[in-house]
Image: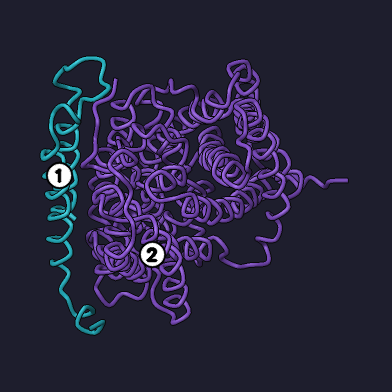
Chain colours: A cyan, B purple
C-alpha cells in the first residue's frame, strides 16, 4: 500500500489541500449565527467569524494555487 | 568564575538586547500586583481581549526550532516548509476556534485534561495531565539550552551564565505575573518578531537587487524550491504524510488539544473573544512563513549552495546581510520567540500539575489560596528542573527532533478522545480510558517498527477512534445532565 502511495502525483496534493480548506469554510457556515456570536458585545457584521474564516481560506486557496 | 569571550558585536546591538531583557523584567514586576486569586494567576481573571490572545498564541507557537530549523529547511526544500504554517495549521485553527474553544469556554475549564475529566473521568484526566506535563518540563530544558547557545555564540556569554540569565528573566515575570503577564509579554515579543521579519526581508531583497531579481533567481536556479509540496516518495516530508499525518491529525491535535496554546483562550474575556483570537492567530499564521522561511530563501539566493549545514542559513543571514542595530533586533526577536515559548509552557504545566494531578490525587480538594501558592511554587520548580535538564540536551544530538517524535506518539490518541468526545455523546468514559491507554501502546509499537512520525500520528489516531466505537456500546455512558455544555448535542445557552 505504501508503494502505491509513493507513486501518487504531486497535483493530487494541491487538490487535497484545497478540498480541506473548502471543507473548513463549509464547516464554518454550517454553524448557526447565534453560536458564532455567543459572547460578542454586539452583533455587528464584522464580528461574524464565518466571514473571517472565509477570507482566511480564500487567501490559502490562492497560496496553494500559486505554489 | 565565568569567562566572557570577547565578540565583535556592535554596542548598539548589546544596548538593544540588554534594554529588552530589562524591559521585560520591569514589566513582570509591575504585573505582580494584579494577582490575587488562582483564577487571576491561571486565567488572567478571564480578562484577555482577542487580539492579545491571538498575538500570544503566535508568540508561543514560534520557537527556536522555527527560527533555526525552519529557515534551514527552507534553504534545503524551499516553500514546502511553509506547509507547517498553512495546511499544517490553518484548518486545525479554524476547527479549534469554531468547534473546540466554545466547549472549553462553556465548560469553564482551566486545562485540556480538566475537559477530558468532565467528558470522560478523572483517570483519563490524570493520565493525560501526567503525559503532557512530563514532555512540557523536558521542553522547557530544551528551550533554555537553545537560548543559552545563542547567547553564548552571539554575545560570548558563558553557557551557565546564559541559562541563569534567561531563567531569571522568564522566571520572574512568569512566576509573579501568571497568565496575564505571559500573554502581554508574548504580545510584545510577537510584535518584535514580525517587525524584525519585515525589516530583514526588505534589507535582504534590496541586497539581492529587488523582488523581481529575487523571484527570477529562485525560478531559474532553484525551481523546486517554489513548490508547496514534495513528491510522495520524499524521505522526510512526503505529501501524503503531510496531508494525512500533519494536516488531519498532528496539526488538529496541536491546535485543539495543546495546553500551552489553548491556556490563554481559557482566559478570554468572552467566548467570542476566545474564538476570534484563534482565527486572528490563523490570519497571522498565514504570514509566519515570511518570518521564518524568508531568511532561508534569502541565504539560498545570496550564498547559493555554499552553506555547509542548512541550520547555518539564519546565522549566515544575521552575519552577512544585517547591519548593526538590525542584527541586534533579529537576535532580540529570536530570544523573544524562545522566551514566549518557555513562559507559556511553564504557566500551562503548573496549571496541570496543581489542578489535574495534585487536586485529583488528593482526597481533600485544594482551596483557591492553596492553588495559587502551589501554582507559583510549581512554576518555579518546573524552571529549576528545566535548568537542570538543559545541559543534558547537549549530550543528545537533535533532542528537539526526538521530543517532537515523542509528542507524535500521544497526540493521535488524545485528539481522538477530544474530537469524538465533543461530537458524539454515545462515547463512554470506559471507552475513553481504554482507547487512550491502548492507543499510546499502539503508537509506541508503530514507533518501534520504525514508521515515519507523520504516519504514526495518523494510524494511532485511527486506532483510538475505532477503539472508542468498539468499546462504547458495551459500557455505561454519561447522562445528558453530566454532559451539559461538554458535547455538541448538549449545548446550552449561557450568559
Report whether B134 appears left or right of B268: right
| Gap between marks 1 and 2 measured at Cα | 27 Å
Image height of B74 relative to B206, above or below: below
Report whether A62 appears left or right of B359: left
Q: Which mark is residue A27?
A: 1
Q: Nearer the viewer, residue B101 or B387?
A: B101
Residue A18, image x, y percentages: 14, 54
Could you say which quadrant of the image residue A6 lies in? Answer: bottom left
**What's the chain of the residue with tag 1?**
A
Q: Residue at x 16, y 17 (%)?
A: A44
Image height of B242 relative to B234, above or below: above
Residue A8, image x, y percentages: 17, 76
Residue B284 in view here: no
Labelled pair 1, 2 in contact (Cβ < 8 Å):
no
Q: Residue at x 51, y 37 (%)?
A: B333
**Quarter of the figure with the C terminus of chain B:** top left
Q: Which mark is residue B435?
A: 2
Using a 10 Å C-alpha cutoff, classify the residue at mark 1 as few (fewer than 14 neighbours), some (14 to 19) or many (20 or more): some
Q: Residue at x 73, y 52 (%)?
A: B388
Residue B352 in view here: yes
Using a 10 Å C-alpha cutoff, classify the residue at mark 2 as few (fewer than 14 neighbours), some (14 to 19) or many (20 or more): many
Amino acid at each position: 500500500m505504501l508503494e502505491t502511495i509513493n507513486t501518487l502525483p504531486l497535483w493530487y496534493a494541491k487538490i487535497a489541500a484545497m478540498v480541506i480548506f473548502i471543507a473548513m469554510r463549509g464547516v464554518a457556515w454550517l454553524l448557526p449565527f447565534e453560536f458564532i456570536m455567543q459572547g460578542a458585545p454586539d452583533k455587528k457584521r464584522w464580528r461574524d467569524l464565518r466571514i473571517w474564516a472565509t477570507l482566511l481560506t480564500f487567501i490559502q486557496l490562492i497560496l496553494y494555487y500559486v505554489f | 568564575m565565568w569567562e566572557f569571550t570577547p565578540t565583535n558585536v556592535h554596542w548598539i546591538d548589546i544596548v538593544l538586547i540588554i534594554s529588552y531583557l530589562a524591559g521585560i523584567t520591569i514589566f513582570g514586576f509591575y504585573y505582580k500586583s494584579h494577582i490575587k486569586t488562582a483564577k487571576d494567576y491561571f486565567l488572567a481573571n478571564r480578562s484577555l481581549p482577542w487580539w492579545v490572545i491571538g498575538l500570544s498564541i503566535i508568540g508561543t507557537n514560534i520557537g527556536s526550532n522555527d527560527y533555526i530549523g525552519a529557515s534551514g529547511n527552507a534553504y534545503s526544500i524551499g516553500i514546502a516548509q511553509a506547509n507547517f504554517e498553512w495546511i499544517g495549521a490553518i484548518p486545525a485553527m479554524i476547527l479549534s476556534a469554531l468547534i473546540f474553544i466554545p466547549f472549553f469556554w462553556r465548560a469553564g475549564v482551566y486545562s485540556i485534561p480538566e475537559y477530558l475529566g468532565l467528558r470522560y473521568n478523572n483517570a483519563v484526566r490524570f493520565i493525560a495531565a501526567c503525559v503532557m506535563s512530563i514532555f512540557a518540563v523536558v521542553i522547557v530544558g530544551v528551550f533554555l539550552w537553545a537560548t543559552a547557545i545563542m547567547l553564548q555564540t552571539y554575545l560570548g556569554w558563558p553557557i551557565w551564565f546564559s541559562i541563569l540569565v534567561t531563567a531569571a528573566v522568564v522566571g520572574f515575570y512568569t512566576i509573579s505575573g501568571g497568565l496575564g503577564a505571559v500573554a502581554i509579554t508574548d504580545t510584545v515579543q510577537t510584535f518584535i518578531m514580525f517587525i524584525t521579519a519585515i525589516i530583514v526581508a526588505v534589507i535582504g531583497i534590496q541586497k539581492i537587487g529587488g523582488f523581481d531579481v529575487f523571484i527570477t533567481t529562485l525560478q531559474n536556479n532553484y525551481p523546486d524550491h517554489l513548490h508547496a509540496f514534495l513528491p510522495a516518495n520524499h524521505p522526510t516530508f512526503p505529501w501524503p504524510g503531510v496531508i494525512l499525518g500533519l494536516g488531519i491529525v498532528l496539526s488538529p491535535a496541536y491546535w485543539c488539544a495543546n495546553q500551552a496554546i489553548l491556556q490563554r483562550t481559557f482566559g478570554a474575556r468572552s467566548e467570542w473573544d476566545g474564538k476570534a483570537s484563534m482565527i486572528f492567530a490563523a490570519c497571522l499564521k498565514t504570514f509566519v512563513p515570511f518570518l521564518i522561511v524568508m531568511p532561508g530563501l534569502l541565504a539560498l539566493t545570496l550564498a547559493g549552495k555554499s552553506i555547509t549545514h542548512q541550520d547555518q542559513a539564519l546565522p549566515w543571514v544575521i552575519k552577512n546581510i544585517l547591519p548593526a542595530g538590525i542584527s541586534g533586533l533579529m537576535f532580540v526577536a529570536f530570544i523573544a520567540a524562545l522566551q514566549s515559548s518557555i513562559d507559556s509552557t511553564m504557566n500551562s504545566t503548573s496549571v496541570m500539575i496543581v489542578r489535574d494531578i495534585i487536586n485529583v490525587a488528593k482526597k481533600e480538594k485544594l482551596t483557591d489560596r492553596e492553588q495559587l501558592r502551589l501554582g507559583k511554587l510549581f512554576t518555579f520548580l518546573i524552571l529549576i528542573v528545566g535548568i537542570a535538564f538543559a545541559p543534558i540536551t547537549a549530550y543528545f544530538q537533535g533532542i528537539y527532533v526526538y521530543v517532537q517524535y515523542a509528542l507524535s506518539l500521544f497526540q493521535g490518541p488524545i485528539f481522538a478522545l477530544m474530537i469524538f468526545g465533543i461530537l458524539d455523546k454515545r462515547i463512554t468514559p470506559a471507552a475513553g480510558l481504554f482507547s487512550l491507554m491502548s492507543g499510546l501502546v499502539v503508537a509506541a509499537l508503530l514507533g518501534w517498527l520504525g514508521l515515519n512520525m507523520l504516519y504514526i500520528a495518523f494510524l494511532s489516531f485511527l486506532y483510538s477512534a475505532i477503539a472508542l466505537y468498539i468499546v462504547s456500546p458495551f459500557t455505561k455512558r454519561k447522562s445528558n445532565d453530566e454532559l451539559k455544555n461538554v458535547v455538541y448535542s448538549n449545548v446550552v445557552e449561557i450568559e
